[in-house]
Image: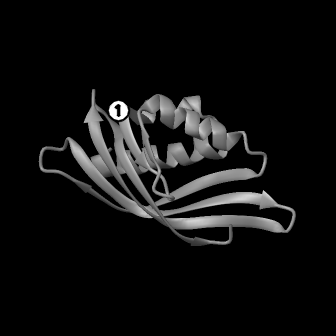
Amino acid sequence: MTDEAAIRDRRQRTNDLIAQHQAEALRPFFDPEVKLIRGDGTLVVGVDATVRLFEAQFGDPDFVAYVRKTVTVAIDQDGKRAAETGTWTGSWRQASGETTKTGQYLAVWKKAQARWVIESELYIALGGTR
């Protein structure tokens, strides 16, 4: 499997785990010192804080999922870091129907012990119905 295919596969696996509301199972996909900037600009640092953030989201009975769709993956010359860009959608159930938040993201991946992990992510909220 190419590095690009491996990153795309790992992104899909994180989407699946989020849809299943399995916060702890997301831990191996993140670097221990991961830095996450949420769509509202909030900074989250570290894998423990990131997992707690997902646990809180999953505790919201209206929360459905976040789906990230990869658009590009660029691998550095050494094959140790990569940049992934794409779009994201968050969805929630409401009495009036499903509501969403949407935007774009940039993820930085690094190869650690022959496996790609997320080093940092930046999410930009650009629209939606919520």
130, above or below 45, in the image: below
Q: How many marks?
A: 1
Q: Which residue is located at x 37 percent, y 37 percent? A: 34
Horizontal arrangement in the rendering, residue 74 relative to residue 117 (left or right): left
Residue that sits furthest to the right in the current view: 95
Q: Nearer the viewer, residue 109 or 39?
A: 39
Kindly state the secondary structure of the residue where label 1 is placed. strand
Place residue 28 in its image quadrant. Answer: top left
Locate the N terminus and report the quarter of the image it occupies.
Answer: top left
Q: Around disc 1, counting alpha carbons within 10 Å, would you say few (fewer than 14), some (14 to 19), or many (20 or more)?
A: some
Inspect this view and state whether residue 20 appears.
no
Which residue sits at x=77%, y=51%?
A: 62
The residue singled out by tag 1 in the image is 33
Q: Give the x, y percent position of residue 108.
A: 31, 49
The colour scheme is one colour
Closer to the camera in the image, 126 or 119? 126
| Whole-percent x, y for residue 52 in the image | 57, 33
Compared across the picture, whether 59 is left or right of 2 comes to right
Taking the image as drawn, is residue 124 in sight?
A: yes
Quarter of the image that includes the C terminus = bottom right
Residue at the location (34% across, 56% down)?
Answer: 84
> Image quadrant of residue 33?
top left
Write the residue at 65% across / 46% down: 19
The picture places residue 113, in percent across and down from the top left corner, at 27, 26
Examine the rendered structure and indicate whether residue 17 appears above or below residue 95: above
**Residue extending furthest left?**
77
Residue flagged by tag 1: what amino acid is it?
Glu
Q: Picture coordinates of residue 36 (x, y %)? A: 42, 46
